[in-house]
Image (cartoon, rainbow, N blue to C red):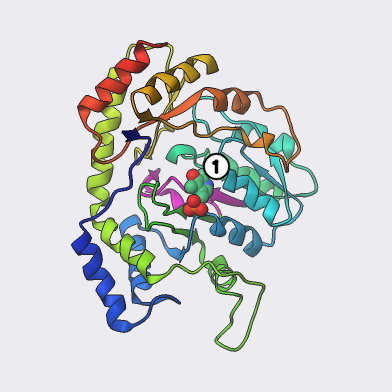
Amino acid sequence: MINVTKTFLPPQAEYQAILKKAWDTGWMTNRGILVKELETKITAYLDTPHIIAMTNGTLPLQIAIKALKLHGEIITTPFSYVATTSSIVWEGCTPVFVDIAPDYLTIDETKIEAAITPNTTAILATHVFGNPCNVAAIADIAKQHNLKVIYDAAHCFGVTYKGQSIFNYGDVSTCSFHATKLFHTGEGGAVFCKQDYYNAIFSHHNFGHDGPEAFQSLGTNAKMSEPQAAMGLAVLPYMDEIIDRRLKIVNAYNQLFEEVSAIKKLVIRSETQWNYCYYPIIFETEIQLLKVIEVLNNKAIFPRRYFYPSLETLPYVEAVNLPHSASISKRVLCLPLFHDLDIDSIQYIVKSIKENI
Ligand SMILES: *Cc1c(COP(=O)(O)O)cnc(C)c1O
């Protein structure tokens, strides 16, 4: 069986050796030595200033919205994982969807200004499949209209844009360290933010504490635990190797699909050092996609419709007409991509697709 992804597991002995440090301290959570070590090592690896490790990649979105004191309308993308939209609604704000650019699959920055109203307080956009949004244009719009910018950078571990970590753009970026993501801690995630927001975000993620006996704000519990951090510390040394291996797999797919005009590939924005986190292909029709899924499933190969459905169809938002997202979400399929996927399987997958479109 071949799934769309497979979690990278470091040698178990290495995980256990790190975990032993937690045993030695008898300290399992509340920012023990492993969480602090992981934060230090991630900021060094990515060259990014401020991080707060958290328990997953969804609470960082909610906490970012809270910390930036957002209310009213938040402009966002319909082509993302449900957490991007649900966090906005969960925080009592209204998502206002702007369609995507059909080549990059990120929010179409040229359509943002038309969606701004006196109630707009922020833009929350996703760097889809690790592909950066047009961060310069979005920063200009935000400045002109006095809006905050949050990036859902769940897919972006290791991505650089114009020579620096993609996490450094916007007011706040969030990342997921879920087991299906490139870098993982089982469940986990983080906020990357400017110094200005660090204290507020830190407090919100820790019940609003201001010292052990005082509270400064409304908080929740989004603390990463020591066993999660241990997994991260065991995976982190392999990140260069993981990204390098995925580059080879993506190149193999690209080569095999080279002359297949019925399949469109993701266009990565220039000046991006990508992390090869997903291999999405876009069919001409949903019928082709459904046929290919059926054929592959019969061969015990399980690609994933990601992102599907387009988020303006969620039952708790207002339906709007977004032609690109509505159409592409029905035609996009992420093919298997993981560390030990072998070349024979890649050839077999591509051959099966070519024979059925
Ligand atoms: C995975 C993902 C999330 C949620 O992260 P979790 O760690 O699963 O909570 C949010 N946004 C996007 C775009 C994702 O892919």
Please state which amino acid type lies under the numbered disc 1.
Answer: Tyr
Q: What element carries label 1?
A: loop
Residue appearing at x 59%, y 80% in the figure: 209
- At label 1, counting other C-alpha atoms closer than 10 Å, the crowd grade (few under 14, some 14-19, many 20 or more) is some
Can residue 257 be seen here?
no
**Mark 1 C-beta to ligand 1 under 8 Å:** yes
Describe residue 48's horizontal placement relative to residue 64 as left or right. left
From this view, report whether residue 14 is shown above or below residue 199: above
In which quadrant will I find the C terminus? Answer: top left
Where is residue 17 shown, x and y percent of the image?
A: 21, 69
Decide which of 1, 19 is in the foreground and name it.
1
For residue 248, which quarter of the picture? top left
Where is residue 95 shown, x and y percent of the image?
A: 70, 44
Q: Say whether residue 173 is magenta.
A: no
Can residue 6 be seen here?
yes
From this view, report whether residue 118 is shown above or below residue 172: above
**Total numbered badges shown on the rendered structure:** 1
Decide which of 314, 182 is in the foreground and name it.
314
Describe residue 123's horizontal placement relative to residue 162 as left or right. right
For residue 75, which quarter of the picture? top right
Where is residue 193 shown, x and y percent of the image?
A: 51, 61
In which quadrant will I find the N terminus? Answer: top left
Describe residue 109's horizontal placement relative to residue 176 as left or right. right
**Magenta highlight range:** 149-170
Q: Mark 1 points at which residue?
A: 81
